[in-house]
Image (cartoon, rainbow, N blue to C red):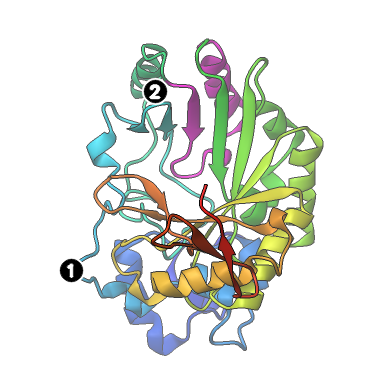
Amino acid sequence: MKTLRTPRELADAGLVPPERLAAIEQVAAQYAVAITPEMAELIDMADPADPIARQFVPNEAELVRRPNESGDPIGDAAHSPVEGIVHRYPDRVLLKPLHACAVYCRFCFRREMVGPGGLGALSPEALDAALAYIARRPEIWEVILTGGDPLILSPRRLGGIVRRLATIEHVKVIRFHTRVPIVDPGRVTPALVRALKAPGKASYVALHANHAREFTPAARAALARLADAGLPLLGQSVLLRGVNDAPEALAALMRAFVENRVKPYYLHHGDLAPGTAHLRTSIAAGQALVRDLRGRLSGLCQPTYVLDIPGGHGKTPIGPNYLEPTTDGACTVEDYTGRRHAYPPE
């Protein structure tokens, strides 16, 4: 089985009924489509609300663009001094060597930049300029390779970028944002694992997954290859309506991360990307879900619930508040069962 990339291929695989094909073709004309065999095989075609399908199979609702949605919802362009670099925070930059992925998520905040009609890969000259930008700025402590998905690069090309970053003395941490170990685990070969590491630098892999069913035996084996090589693993998820916005679904996802030696890092509130309103929850619903995790699940399973402020102003934590000040300088503190307790003033 090959990666499904067109509405006709989705229909032939039974993922799109014939009567919806014309509408799905309109969606595919705007936003890239790709579903790997590993993800296609997970989809329960008897379940119209299947959480895997909801992430990857195009939906007519994507044609509805709300006024508050944007093609650049987190403001990358405002912080891109040279092609391929986003420098939003003082001590770290994003380096985007390509704008292609193994799969295309229906909620992607860069959906107008990625895929065959997107921004493409950096030319050798643009990559040189991006690396020169990093080298000239000693405040840059961490470089985050993203895109697109950097792990779809060949080990040779990815290793070449890592080796060049390793020559920059002030860069101490190299982080990779990826879906590959989950959606295309066969790519995580010994050569690719070696390519992620550089002498004298700390390499981290941030894994994106949104439902516990994504952790197939092959995905678990790929994550083990990374963890056994000494690479620290972090987990990132997007809060998605109909995918992980129920307490048990979110709890199962966080436990799946930890069982595979992946520390939950961020739970992202859905960005205001065009055509994604049907997948977003309210912030209040997200706060209630995160509150439900506290105490009921191990501390290892607790992500930070964050919102990327539209317009390029960065991430901010938006989790529930457990502390309420009182007029005398004291406060009341809520425990995980919802009971409140007095705490004295300092």
Q: CA distance from mark 1 to mark 2?
A: 35 Å
Magenta run includes residue 155: yes
> Dot 2, how many residues are within 10 Å of its Cα: few (below 14), some (14-19), or many (20+)?
many
- Return the x and y of residue 165 as percentages of the image width and height: 52, 18
In magenta, the rendered stretch is: 140-168
Q: Please check the rendered image and state whether residue 344 is part of the magenta-colored stretch, yes or no.
A: no
- Name the amino acid, label 2: Leu
Q: Nearer the viewer, mark 1 or mark 2?
A: 1
Neighbour class for label 1 at 10 Å: few (<14), some, many (≥20)? few
Element class at badge 2: helix
Give the residue displayed 53% in from the left and 75% down from the top. 245
In the displayed structure, would residue 55 be above or below residue 90?
A: below
Q: Report x, y in % for residue 136.
A: 36, 11
Q: Considering only order in the chain, which callout, 2 or 1, is on the residue closer to the N terminus?
A: 1
Nearer-the-camera pick, 336 or 325: 325
Q: Residue 180 placed where, x, y %? A: 61, 49
Q: Which residue is mark 1?
A: 67
In the displayed structure image, the side of residue 232 where residue 110 appears, left or right: left
- The location of residue 145, given as percent across then percent down, is 49, 34
Disc 1 secondary structure class: loop
Amino acid on which disc 1 is placed: Pro
Residue 234 in the figure: left or right of residue 127: right
Residue 92 visible to the viewer: yes
Rendered-image quadrant of the N terminus: bottom right
| Residue at image location 37% in from the left, 33% down from the top | 89
101 shown above or below 136: below
Give above or below for 21 relative to 157.
below
Residue 127's disc is: 2
Q: Determine whether, in the image, residue 75 is placed left or right of residue 248.
A: left
> Is residue 7 or residue 44 the one in the foreground?
44
